[in-house]
Image (cartoon, rainbow, N blue to C red):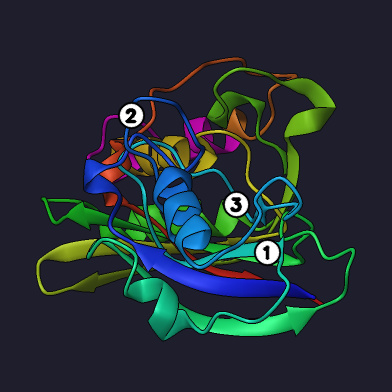
Amino acid sequence: MRIAYKLAYVGTNFHGFQYQPNVRTVAGELFKAFRSVGVDLKKAKFRCAGRTDAGVHAFGQVIALNMDRLTFPRVLNSQLPSDITVWAWSEVEDEFNPRKAKRRTYMYVIPAESFDISAMRKACKLLLGTHDFSNFTKGFGGRKCVRTIYDVELRVDEGFVILEIVGNAFTWNMVRCIVSALREVGSGHRSLDWFSDMLNPEKHKERIEPAPAYGLILKDVEYD
């Protein structure tokens, strides 16, 4: 059988999700837990919805693997450290790959400053639809950076500015680069016209440094 699990983790003390020898990663801790309950990882075809970077958190990460018998979340949690929690499961089709998601939702939490929230919200509206996010991506550009954004919300809550963004997929560091650009607009250092130009890399090419990893949360991953 193939089982999908949803899990949450605090990314502060991890060197990212993907397994790396000799450093602490989310996948590394999961592998140890699955081995402890008798899963043969060589046959498991382990997959995840996204390989979050070092310091990035998750509430709705999805993993899937083949197992001879179901292991309930409470059993896995007894073998996992306190900064990882498995909280849901479902049996899925044999070919299910968590990376082939319909929608992904990320949150980014920014300490509130003297931002122009109205300007930031106007910039958020410019993100809606399909765009080439080459200027908001680290490592590559071109067609590989075309993504569709379905919904964006910016709210202020208890001294924090919270961005919630829903899209079909996100490129490397895309959300963190968007946050950096929104901060530039909110602080008055850059204009809405500049933000709009950033969404048109054929006209305007400019790389922007991503915001820190610690504010980013993979909130949810959805499937058909």
- Of labels 2 and 3, the one closer to you: 2
Q: Which residues lie in the magenta part?
A: 185-196
Q: Position of residue 80 (x, y in %)?
A: 33, 64
Q: Which mark is residue 23?
A: 2
Query: Is residue 204 one of those drawn in magenta?
Result: no
- Whether residue 106 is visible to the viewer of this picture, yes or no, is no
- Please tell me whether residue 178 is drawn above or below residue 126 in the rendered image: above
Q: Which residue is mark 3?
A: 127
Q: Quadrant of residue 208?
A: top left
Mark 2 Cα-neighbour bin, 10 Å: few <14, some 14–19, many ≥20:
few
125 and 31: which is toward the camera? 31
The disc labelled 3 sits on which kind of residue?
A: Leu
CA gap between label 2 and label 1 equals 23 Å
- Image point (72%, 58%), residue name: 168
The disc labelled 2 sits on which kind of residue?
A: Val
- Of labels 1 and 3, the one closer to you: 1
Q: Is residue 192 left or right of residue 94?
A: left
Q: Position of residue 120 (x, y in %)?
A: 37, 53
Q: Which residue is mark 1?
A: 64
Quarter of the image containing the N terminus? bottom right
**Please, what secondary structure does the residue beneath circle 3 have?**
helix
| N-terminal-most mark, 1 or 3 | 1
- Please tell me whether residue 80 is drawn above or below residue 75 in the rendered image: above
